[in-house]
Image: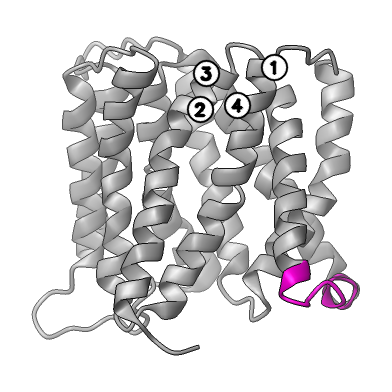
């Protein structure tokens, strides 16, 4: 594939635009569907979408080859994402204001840096420690609405689920770190494997009485643009990029744009502590990304 930084920006901005809308879509959908119901419809939609993309690429035949070579690996991927990750995330959105859930979830990259130490053998640098403290302090500011010493939460369970979801998502990317196969094929396999688990959990813990068309519309939107096309567009952006660093930094637009849309689309009043906490989290992530002095990162995508 020929490199084209302009195309990379176009794909990246499209992905960020889609991801900026999903917090609103989550919250609207959860007004009509339970978290498991939302997950079931969204995962089905995403699976069909990814299958069409893989078919157009002429790669459906390799699905069986991938699965036969590493069945336990793809089972683990499917259980982590979308099953556990989105189940916990949607429940967190159900319990918390969307601004809190989406911003707390944004600390997943900080969680990833912690998990990379024992599982990938990476060293924790001094600036990583600073970033971790700053990022989680930002999360505490958001969760307590600025009353960090009072430690009063709207929903302790919701905060816990949002933070645990970052652990699940970071674990998913740890598993992907050394994977050399086609990422879209692997994502499709994970979604296909997850569907029986999601359906079984819906049968045991919820029900299939999903009659509200608004819920269906929202869940299909989530499946198409959060789980499906958003990932593919971001992947295309990284593939076209001659320099991935500025492309990766586009993602920092998403949470701020999402707060604006939450206010405009669902009328959620943004608490003053939320943008302050989010700014602390983004600052923490930038501290991890910006190289010091003449030191260069070995992998521009990490």
Q: Give the residue number, with chain letter if any, for mark 2.
A: 25
Q: Give the residue number, with chain letter if any, for mark 4.
A: 218
Question: Considering only order in the chain, which callout, 1 or 3, is on the residue closer to the N terminus?
Answer: 3
When the figure is inspected, residue 251 is found, relative to residue 153, above or below; the finding is below
Q: Nearer the viewer, residue 13 or 87?
A: 13
Name the secondary structure under disc 1.
Answer: helix
Question: Considering only order in the chain, which callout, 2 or 1, is on the residue closer to the N terminus?
Answer: 2
Q: Is residue 15 visible?
A: yes
Residues tagged 1 and 4 counted as in contact (Cβ below 8 A)? no
When the figure is inspected, residue 295 is found, relative to residue 10, above or below; the finding is below
Q: Give the residue number, with chain letter if any, for mark 1.
A: 213
Residues tagged 3 and 2 counted as in contact (Cβ below 8 A)? yes
Magenta highlight range: 55-67
Name the secondary structure under disc 4.
Answer: helix
Disc nearest the viewer among 3 and 1: 1
Determine the CA span between mark 4 and mark 3: 7 Å
């Amino acid at each position: 594939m020929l490199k084209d930084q302009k195309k990379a920006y176009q794909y990246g901005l499209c992905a960020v635009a889609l991801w900026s809308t999903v917090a609103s879509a989550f919250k609207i959908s959860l007004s009509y569907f339970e978290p498991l119901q939302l997950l079931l419809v969204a995962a089905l939609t995403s699976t069909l979408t990814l299958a069409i993309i893989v078919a157009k690429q002429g790669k459906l035949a390799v699905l069986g080859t991938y699965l036969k070579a590493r069945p336990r690996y793809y089972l683990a991927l499917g259980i982590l994402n979308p099953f556990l990750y989105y189940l916990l995330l949607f429940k967190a959105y159900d319990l918390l204001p969307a601004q809190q859930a989406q911003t707390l979830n944004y600390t997943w990259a900080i969680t990833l840096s912690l998990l990379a130490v024992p599982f990938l053998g990476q060293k924790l640098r001094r600036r990583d420690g600073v970033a971790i403290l700053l990022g989680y302090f930002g999360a505490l500011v958001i969760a307590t609405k600025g009353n960090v010493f009072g430690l009063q939460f709207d929903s302790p369970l919701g905060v816990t689920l949002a933070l645990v979801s970052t652990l699940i998502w970071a674990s998913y990317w740890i598993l992907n770190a050394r994977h050399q196969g086609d990422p879209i094929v692997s994502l499709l396999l994970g979604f296909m494997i997850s569907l029986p688990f999601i359906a079984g959990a819906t049968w045991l813990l919820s029900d299939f009485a999903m009659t509200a068309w608004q819920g269906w519309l929202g869940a299909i939107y989530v499946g198409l643009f959060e789980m499906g096309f958003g990932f593919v567009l971001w992947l295309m952006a990284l593939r076209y990029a001659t320099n991935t660093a500025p492309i990766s930094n586009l993602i920092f637009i998403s949470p701020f744009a999402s707060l604006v849309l939450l206010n405009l689309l669902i009328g959620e009043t943004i608490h003053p502590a939320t943008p302050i906490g989010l700014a602390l989290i983004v600052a923490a992530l930038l501290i991890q990304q910006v190289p010091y002095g003449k030191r260069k990162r070995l992998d521009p995508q990490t």
